[in-house]
Image (cartoon, rainbow, N blue to C red):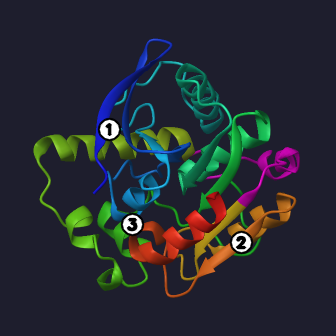
Amino acid sequence: MVAFTEEMVDVGGTKVHTLKGGSGEPLLLLHGAGGNNGWLKSIDALAEKYTVYYPSHPGYGKSERPDWLETIPDMAAFYTWYLETLGLEGIRAVGFSMGGWIASEIAATCGHSFSKLMLVGAVGIKPNVAEIADLFIISPAQVLDLMFHDPSQAPEYKAVYQKELTPEDAMIAEGNREMAVRLCWKPYMHDPRLTSLLARVNIPTRMVWGKNDQIVPVECGELYNKAIKGSDLVVIDNCGHSPQVEKPNEFIKAALDFLA
């Protein structure tokens, strides 16, 4: 595996826990509502080509949260500050699920932040026909059941999702869920402005979706594709909400082909 470090990045007095590793041009990864799952196979493959920055969002994991940060647009504003602090404006970015929503808000409102953008199973746009699963009225175990089309084909499933939690791990997981509710509850998992604002995005953009995503339907990927001029949509067969975990080889190919 590529060696990586853990560091606290101070952004206006808020410390953000960040995993960093690899070599080459910088690449920002933004995790989903469940939190940062660490340096997985797919992250490691990206780090063979890029210097990966993989922060835990403010209010998640070991990262602090400034009192003013309450919404996804707040989070987007915070990350523009994070990029300025590290001198990373113009970076490539990959956003997973809620992280895709954050990334799309940044791209739509701060055009110089990213040079390329990839959204993986991103929330942020309300579907017209299907529905985004309500993750806050079901248990974490039920959420996990919805995440994967076939857990047996995910090589890191047991290590990531079936490990025994320490008391600290359990506390972090509960804090992550509480932060997700704070950010995404109302309106649920979308920004009514976003579809219109995405007309401003003029950088290369790719959506990657699991065809069998039971949390964020492929329809949302199609709506992103329609809203962002010149973008494309890659749909991975027999795959649920986390292609980077369930179908890492297909995800890595789609990512590296696009980011190059």
Q: Is residue 123 visible?
A: no
Q: Residue furthest front?
A: 24
**213 vs 228: above or below:** below
Question: As shown in the figure, which amino acid type bears the numbered disc 3?
Answer: Val
Which element carries disc 3, helix, strand or loop? helix
Majority secondary structure in the magenta region? loop
Q: CA distance from mark 3 to mark 1?
A: 19 Å
**What are the residue bounds of the magenta stretch?**
185-205
Side of 113 where 20 appears, left or right: left
Side of 245 where 72 appears, left or right: right
User: Given this view, does label 3 or label 1 mark the residue nearer the observer?
Assistant: 1
**For the point 34% across and 64% down, which residue is it?**
41
Question: As shown in the figure, which amino acid type bears the numbered disc 1?
Answer: Gly
Circles 3, 1 touching at the beta carbon (< 8 Å): no
Side of 145 where 221 appears, left or right: right
Residue 233 disc label: 2
Q: Which residue is mark 1?
A: 61
Q: Is residue 134 visible?
A: yes
Write down the quadrant of residue 205 in the picture.
bottom right
Labels in figure, total: 3
Label whose residue precedes the other's in the sequence (1 or 2): 1
Side of 175 where 13 appears, left or right: right
Q: Which residue is mark 3?
A: 143
